[in-house]
Image (tube, rainbow, N blue to C red):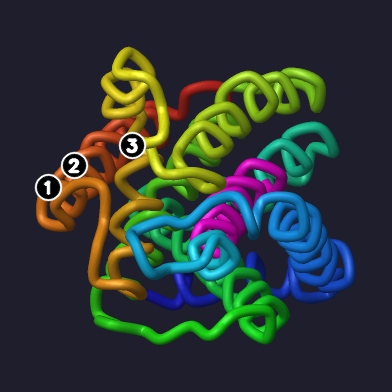
Amino acid sequence: MSGFRTLFYKEVLRFWKVATQTVAAPVLTALLYLLIFSHVLESHIRVYGTVSYTAFLIPGLVMMSVLQNAFANSSSSLIQSKVTGNIIFVLLPPISYREFYAAYVLAAVVRGLVVGFGVLVATIWFAPLEVDNPLWVLAFAVLGGGMLGSLGIVAGIWADKFDQLAAFQNFLIMPLTFLSGVFYSIHSLPPFWQQLSHFNPVFYMIDGFRHGFFGVSDVSPWLSLSIVGACFVLLGMLTLFMLERGYKLRN
């Protein structure tokens, strides 16, 4: 497993060396979201009866940061390596495609968790927040980060240019995360949009993660965990298939 350890260390070091951009900047962005939305809507919205809007918003912003940064880590690493040509130094050593996948996904999860923890530390001062069940919080954070890390590998393999990766992120990742209930409960939506939200896998990640804090959620956390787990497995199988075939990597 020395190949896995080396590649994992390289991927973690890659984002940590520019932590101002990869960690501090997303934390600041989430903090700005909290300041703006809580200031405008705090006195108008109450969620789950006794939960203030600011407290409701914090777990959503934490999980959104975990997902977006997990995706960004694996996708940006691959596209940069492909564009600059140094992907050859990763492909030449005798590292199996499973080790390749595990190293990239685990590094993506690490970055997502680091950013998510930073967002939590920066925003927790704005509202009293207790963790009802830390295991739910950890389970959805790790599974969600792993799923978006896998999706980032798929995007990085598929894209040949930075603008293609940007399109993938702007037209898929951003809508899925922003329309997942980060800023609202789906029960506040009209019936049609409530039903449509149930087809968004990111909704289940956000809702299950939030359940770990408040003990209440829009849907059952077990249903959310099942759907997120199934999506992670299916996406992982697709990613491993692409890596095994060397799709757009060994050509």
Assess disc 2: are there few (<14), some (14-19) or many (≥20) residues with their C-alpha within 10 Å of its C-alpha: some
The residue lying at 61 percent from left, 68 percent from top is 111
**In terms of depth relative to the viewer, which is nearer, 81 or 220?**
220
The picture places residue 103, in percent across and down from the top left corner, at 47, 63
> Residue 140 falls in which quadrant of the image?
bottom left
Q: Earlier in the sequence, mark 1 or mark 3?
A: 3
Q: Describe residue 192's horizontal placement relative to residue 250 as left or right.
A: left
* Secondary element at image label 2: helix
**Residue 52 in the image, given as x and y percentages of width and height:** 51, 67
Q: Which residue is mark 3?
A: 187
Q: Work out whether residue 251 or residue 131 is closer to the camera in this orientation and state it.
A: 131
Task: Work out how far the residue at label 1 is from the one at label 3, CA to CA, in angstroms.
Answer: 17 Å
The residue depicted at 60 percent of the width and 65 percent of the height is 54
Residue pictured at 47% horizontal, 56% vertical = 46
* Label 1 packing within 10 angstroms: few (<14), some (14-19), many (20+): few
Task: State the SS at label 3.
Answer: helix
Q: Amino acid at mark 2?
A: Ile
The image quarter containing residue 169 is: top right
Residue tagged 2: 227
Membership of 20 in magenta stretch: no
Q: Which of marks 2 and 3 precedes in the sequence?
A: 3
Q: Residue furthest top?
A: 192
Look at discs 1 and 2 and give the one toward the viewer.
1
Which region is colored magenta? 60-77
The quarter in which the N terminus is drawn is bottom left
Which three-letter amino acid code belongs to the residue tagged 3? His
Q: Is residue 74 magenta?
A: yes
Q: Dot 1: what SS?
A: helix
